[in-house]
Amino acid sequence: MTARKQIFAWIVLTWMFVTIVAYYIFHKPISIDQVLLMGKSVWGIVVASSVILAGAAIGRLLFSRLLQGFTPRSIVLLALEAGLGLGTLSLVWLLVGLIGGFETILAWAVLIVIGFGARHQILGWCRDMVVVIIKVIPNTRTETCLAAFVFFMIIVALLSALAPTSAWDALLYHLTGPKANIASGRLEINPWLPETGYPQGLEMLYTWVILLGSSRAAGVLHWFFGFLTLLLVWQWGEELVDSETGWLGCAILVSATTFTTMMGKAYVDVATILFTALGIAAIKHWRDTELDAALVVCGFSAGFAFGTKYTGVVIGIGLAVLIAIAQPRRVMRNLMVFGVPAIVVSTPWLFKNALLAGNPTYPFFFNGLGWDSIRADWFSQLGTGLLYSAPLKLIAAPLIMTIVGKEGIETWHATFGPLFIMLVPLIAIRWKHHTCRTWLRDALIFFIVLYLIWLYGAAVSRLMIQPRFLFPALPPLAVLSAMAYGSLRSLENTSFAIHRVSGFIIALVLFLTAFRFGIDMLQRQDLPVLTGALSEEDYLYHRLGWHYAAVQKIGDLPDGSRVLFLFEPRSYYCPSHRCLPDGILDIWYHARRQGGTAASMAQDWREENVSHVLFYALGAQTLREAGKDPFTEEDWVELDRLQSNQLKLVENFGDVYMLYELPPR
């Protein structure tokens, strides 16, 4: 090329560059605000991934001897390493919280030390996970369709996990507790929020990721527990039958949309489900090898399930039943091998409550910090269950919870989808011809144990009529359901292809489930906020409505203000230590049962330095109209007196919330 052509080429390139730059100065393809919003999502993934890899490395380091009998580079081994490692780190952060070490610099120091000191374990775990993912890739058209459904569902759940938190229980205590702990620098139990006395295994990890700079990472972390659970379901199906059964089992599990929805929230339920699945996987390995190490692993899984949620004790009971049935003559010895590690990793949470609240099982069974018999009766509401209101529903509970149950409603608060109840009974077809009857029997027995305990709770208290307590049993039931579908091939004849017809029905259910799940995502506006097309504030106004407006107003109150909530338990977006939430909706009930009047309660609140009251009028109205809670008409009349005579209205938020000032006496 001649010098003249080179000069001309540079002139052309310069002209193109100047034109493009000038154009996009006035036509910005993306704003700085959008970059920052998308950056929050990316940072959430980075922080969550870092904590997950740290957990996997700790699991590989500490439990390598116990896990050496498991198949190398298997899904079960990788899930056990990650699950047990994250459970161990939750205990580490429990200790840090008790000694007042919730500081950002320490959070980064722990992550960096693990990252550097266990870098070989991290790289090894990542390499093994890549091998596993390659193994899971579908091979047939049917598997590809099932995988596409599963992939769509979990990606939608991940998008939800990355969005600013708006889920009820996250705003109530799963994230509110960690936020308050960080503000004080130590682990606390808030008597206004008794749920902070629950075991907080996952909340400790949430505290860690928030200290690392991303509250959104909490949802991603919870999503990862669901991802590992699905890998285990695929592994079971593939080992027991084939890869297609594994993918169908995964599809059936995510079609229970409460499971998939919970994956996208900063909750703890899916972590409990994973620890349950790890315990069942350990029992399967123990049955195959009779290695005591597998029982120890099962015990750790049960203990970490309890450390995630009090109902994890039911998981331990179910696993103990399976162990006892497997070897009746050695039951005491086996239960000891299982029980000791379970107790070791469960006890720290009881010690935490005894130390901070004066009751190891706070807020249950005994009194403690801010707790008495009145609050205990309110919280349990014994005598209000189905046994007293609709005993026939106890008999038809499985059908009712499947047909009527829906995420967000008051009583049957979970969506199972129709596939479980449709397919599980069909496992009886050609039962004797199944080569894995022992595993199938264990899956059924485990579900029956959980179901009977749940049924008792639902019988005595309406607060226990929450079918999602049964979700820890769904992973093995999903595999069982997939195998039941496979059994239908034995019923086919030349005139009627029952297997193909039922396959079409399953495909229709999966399509409708995906369609509804996608529509829900669009209505939530998750994508606009993640791409920056919608601001975080506008998203929260869209999702939380007047609640967000009210707590934003509280943030504008003068320094030193202290706001008492009435009939509103959520306080996450409220400035730390400024708000006193109505954690179990009993503030008014408790005061009235103690003989309080509007005047005496107002004076008591003044003595506690309360300056304002946020009244959730719609919540109180709902309770009043339902007539199910033990309020009397005089209680409501006295509430009206409080608003009329003792409080001064500051702002009315659409007749949904009322912010009052509590004037000095």
Image (tube, rainbow, N blue to C red):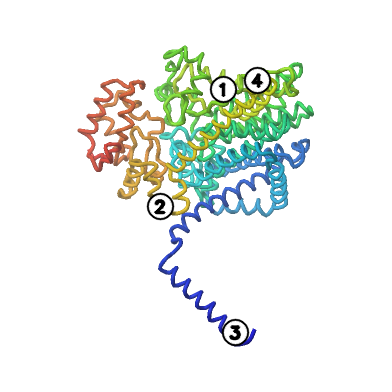
Q: Which mark is residue 535?
A: 2
Query: Badge 4 is on which residue?
Result: 495
Mark 2 or mark 1: whose residue is earlier in sequence: 1
In the image, residue 420 lies at what x, y percent? 58, 25
Could you tell whether 443 is left or right of 102 in the image?
Answer: right
Q: Are marks 4 and 2 in contact (CB under 8 Å)?
A: no
Query: Badge 1 is on which residue?
Result: 421
Distance (Cα) linking label 2 and label 1: 42 Å
Camera-nearest label, 1 or 3: 3
Q: Secondary structure at mark 4?
A: loop
Distance (Cα) linking label 3 and label 2: 50 Å
Mark 4 or mark 3: whose residue is earlier in sequence: 3
Q: Are marks 4 and 3 in contact (CB under 8 Å)?
A: no
Q: Is residue 411 above or below residue 74?
A: above
In the image, residue 631 lies at what x, y percent? 32, 22
Distance (Cα) linking label 4 and label 2: 59 Å
Which of 536/651 is in front? 536
Q: Is residue 24 above or below residue 366?
A: below
Query: Badge 3 is on which residue?
Result: 5
